[in-house]
Amino acid sequence: MKFLLGALFTVFVTITGVFAVVSSGVVSVGADQEHSPMMYSFLETARNRSIENASKDIVVPDLEKVDMISSGGADYKDMCAGCHLSPGVAQTDFSESLYPKPPNFTKADIVKRYQTEDGAQQSFWAIKHGIMASGMPAWGASHDDDRMWAMVAFIRSLPELSEAQYTMLTTRIDSDIMDMSFDGDMDMSEDGSGMQH
């Protein structure tokens, strides 16, 4: 009985102590100061285990299809490259200002963890739901699953891309331009110049 009371007292004192420290305002939340190694490890472990648990039942589509990789490029450029970088770009204002630092998806050693099925599930989950207090938005609020899977497919191929390939795969072609037609607005002459004689 004494052991149980001692354990309960210890838990109570610990919770009260944590509450007192948090309530005092002495804990810095500035993104320009690093956590202690123990706190950083604790938070990173909590984040990783949470994502692993939440994503384990997600069904991964075929991410090797060329059209899926290419369709994710423009969204990656618009929504991800500012933090996660692109070929030939070593840093941006966002990537340097966030803490913890966002992973650099142009690096093969970083992206290799997303090459597995578990990694694909986890990256999709993170893109869809975001990560609290990290700067990572929940893109699922504005994008459907197909677009987010296309971003996962693109990220997995990103370390292999040159700057020119990246530019080609991330250029968004305006559908209005593609749908242009000459609905009688322009009289085509016999020489095909469109000029009236």
Image: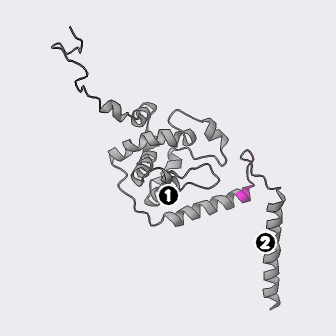
Choose between 85 and 186: the one closer to the eye: 186
Residue 16 on the magenta span: no
State the image quarter where residue 27 is shown.
Answer: bottom right
Residue farthest toward the top in the current orientation of the protein? 197
Tell me the element at label 1: helix
Residue farthest toward the bottom in the current orientation of the protein? 1
Q: Is residue 96 above or below residue 137?
A: above
Residue 90 lies, in percent from the top left, at: 58, 35
Residue 180 lies, in percent from the top left, at: 29, 29
Tell me the element at label 2: helix
Task: Name the residue type under label 1.
Answer: Trp
Give the residues drawn in magenta, as a range: 32-39
State the image quarter where residue 196 is shown.
Answer: top left
- Specify whether residue 157 is in view: yes
Tell me how far mark 1 sits from mark 2, CA to CA: 32 Å
- Tag 1 and tag 2, C-beta contact below 8 Å: no
Choose between 63 and 185: the one closer to the eye: 185
Other-residue count near label 2 (Cα within 10 Å), few / some / many at <14 / 14–19 / ≥20: few
Total number of numbered discs in the rendering: 2
Q: Is residue 155 above or below residue 171?
A: below
Q: Which residue is mark 2?
A: 15
Point 22% across, 24% down: residue: 184
Question: Dominant secondary structure of the magenta stretch?
Answer: loop
Which quarter of the rendering shows the N terminus? bottom right
Q: Is residue 182 left or right of residue 40?
A: left
Q: Earlier in the sequence, mark 1 or mark 2?
A: 2
Residue farthest toward the left in the current orientation of the protein? 190
Q: Which residue is mark 1?
A: 125
Residue 3 lies, in percent from the top left, at: 80, 87
Task: Name the residue type under label 2.
Answer: Ile
Point 52% across, 32% down: residue: 88
Other-residue count near label 1 (Cα within 10 Å), few / some / many at <14 / 14–19 / ≥20: many
